[in-house]
Image: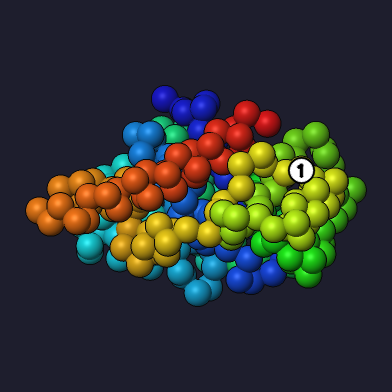
Amino acid sequence: MPNHNLVVIAAMARKGGSGKTTLSRALISAAVAAKRRVLLIDTDSTGVLGTWHRRADANGLGSPLLRSATAESVTAVDRTIEQVYEEDLADFVFIDTAGVGAEWSDSIAVLADHIVTPVMLSTSDLDVGAQTADWFEKLRSRVDDPDSLPRHHVVLNMVDPKTTRADAALIQAAVARFPLIETVMLRRNAYKEMDEKGLLHAIALQKQADPNPLMRPHVRHVVEAIEEATDILNNILEK
């Protein structure tokens, strides 16, 4: 039977290096930690997200709940989503894209339920983030049914845990400019470890089982990252 509750989330940003793939990994980790079935579709020619999934499995830090696919055309993405929907193969589909302004960006956007854009906390990155927000607003004039478009969400990324006065001013500017998710992604070593090794909850379980007792206190940092990513995913789904 079709899965009418299937959710498709596309990570899209004008600028490379904004943390798009790291955000995707964190959201995927949160969904799998919640025991949801996930298919990731890597449309970026670099194949970074698909490579991460294979690395996670090779490290024993993947999950049978997570599968990945590559797509070399919008038609392939559409067919994959349709198959997942009709055969109830997943609860979430995450699409990592080459970025706004790429040839497929408009078409990929139409296939998603939610678009999520990471923006780093600097004046320049806020300006680039505004370009992505402007693209989405202009997309409304290019489609036949603007109400069918996905919801757009912006996540502040790589925020220092100790915010300065300048950071606070930038956050206020972001609140005024973007459809901002309340929870920010902090600058965390756990996300670097996630990129290197695999899913966050699998890393936490590995540390918890480590025979070296000195490793166990590090579990807390990974758990905090899972909680943060879960809050962001829940905020996306609620809006």
Q: Is residue 46 visible?
A: yes
Q: Which secondary structure lies at badge 1?
A: loop
Q: Which residue is more in the foreground, 54 or 197?
A: 197
28 with respect to 120 (left or right): left
Residue 237 versus residue 115 in the image, above or below: above
30 with respect to 99 (left or right): left
Residue 65 versus residue 67 in the image, above or below: above
Q: Which residue is mark 1?
A: 179
* Outermost bottom residue: 46
Residue 101 image offset from top left, x and y in percent: 74, 67
Q: Which residue is more in the foreground, 49 or 199?
A: 199
59 with respect to 12 (left or right): left
Residue 49 image offset from top left, x and y in percent: 45, 63
Q: Amino acid at mark 1?
A: Pro
Q: Residue at x 19, y 56 (%)?
A: 214
Quarter of the picture containing the C terminus is: top right
Q: Quadrant of residue 91?
A: top left
Q: Residues within 10 Å of mark 1 (few under 14, many from 20)?
A: some
Q: Which residue is more in the foreground, 219 or 176?
A: 219
Residue 111 image offset from top left, x and y in percent: 64, 46
Residue 131 versus residue 173 in the image, above or below: below
43 with respect to 218 (left or right): right
Q: Which residue is more in the foreground, 30 or 157?
A: 157
Q: Residue at x 25, y 58 (%)?
A: 57
Image coloring type: rainbow
Q: Residue at x 15, y 52 (%)?
A: 213
Quarter of the picture containing the N terminus is: top left
Residue 231 image offset from top left, x and y in percent: 53, 37
Residue 21 versus residue 137 in the image, above or below: below
Q: Is residue 105 visible?
A: no
